[in-house]
Amino acid sequence: MRVVFVHGACVRDGSWWWHRTAGLLRERGVSSTAPALPSCGETELPAGTGGPGLAEDVTAVRRALLDGEEPTVVVAHSYGGIVAAEAAAGVESVRHLVLVSSYLPEVGQSLSDFGDGGPAPFLDVDPDTGTFGVRPELLVDTFLQDCDAEVRARAADHLARQSVRVTGQPVGAAAWQRVPSTYVVCARDRGTPPSLQREYARRAGTVVELDTGHHPFLSAPAAVRDLLPSL
């Protein structure tokens, strides 16, 4: 068994965001990878107007999924659920999807379909560059209030400006319709309200609630590890 992690919006260095849960999995002999998302400027092409969008993110994750035949669990966080919905579709090795405070889009839906028509107050949108990002001064209180001091101190170094194009680009497949899925509701999440998460979770096969903020894989990594199925 292996795990492929798909990080959320406006961050980079997925291996850092997932490192605590990945370390616990490694102790049990489970390998993992966290592919870079081009729309977050993690490749040679800069994010922004005319730069990589959802299609490039899907390609990057799908490439990681196809790089091996062992049974695979995809763990997607927040925006990562949009990417995983298309990237994991039809990949035979993918046996389970775990969606953490995330989205399960129908074919043709985009990230913007899950919003209220405007940017969240913790986001900064720059129309000149065609990017958006988390306001650094709101990062901890919104997303990391239950994390320890080390995580809080280091997280801002792993933020990224992301192409705003990804918010309106629809997915072409919905893997969760055919692959068993678990939705993880983060009950103290200040970024994605738990009430909305519970609504999104109706599409999942199984729903679990954790008493955490937006990043349980950093604040409660053992709890996330223990949710992953043994294949």
Image: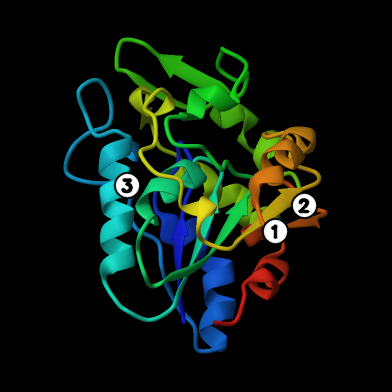
Against 76, is 132 above or below? above
Q: CA distance from mark 1 to mark 2?
A: 7 Å
Disc 1 + disc 2, Cβ < 8 Å: yes
| Residue highlighted by disc 3 | 58
Few, some or many residues within 10 Å of mark 3 (<14, 14–19, 20+): many
Residue type at numbered disc 1? Ser
Mark toward the start of the polypeptide (1 vs 2): 2
Against 17, is 174 above or below? above
Residue type at numbered disc 2? Thr
Q: Is residue 89 left or right of residue 112?
A: left
Disc 3 + disc 2, Cβ < 8 Å: no
Q: Mark 1 against mark 2, which lies toward the viewer?
A: 2
Mark toward the start of the polypeptide (3 vs 2): 3
Residue 41 at least partly seen: no
Give residue 212's mark: 2
**Picture coordinates of residue 84, whole percent (x, y):** 44, 50
Mark toward the start of the polypeptide (1 vs 3): 3
**Picture coordinates of residue 199, whole percent (x, y):** 73, 37
Against 38, is 96 above or below? below
Few, some or many residues within 10 Å of mark 2 (<14, 14–19, 20+): many
| Residue highlighted by disc 1 | 219
Q: Residue furthest front?
A: 178
Q: Mark 3 against mark 2, which lies toward the viewer?
A: 3
Helix, strand or loop at disc 3? helix
Q: Which colour style is shown?
A: rainbow
**Picture coordinates of residue 139, whole percent (x, y):** 61, 35
Helix, strand or loop at disc 1? helix
Q: Quadrant of the C terminus?
A: bottom right
Residue type at numbered disc 3? Val
| Residue drawn at point x = 27 percent, y = 31 percent | 47
**Picture coordinates of residue 126, whole percent (x, y):** 39, 14
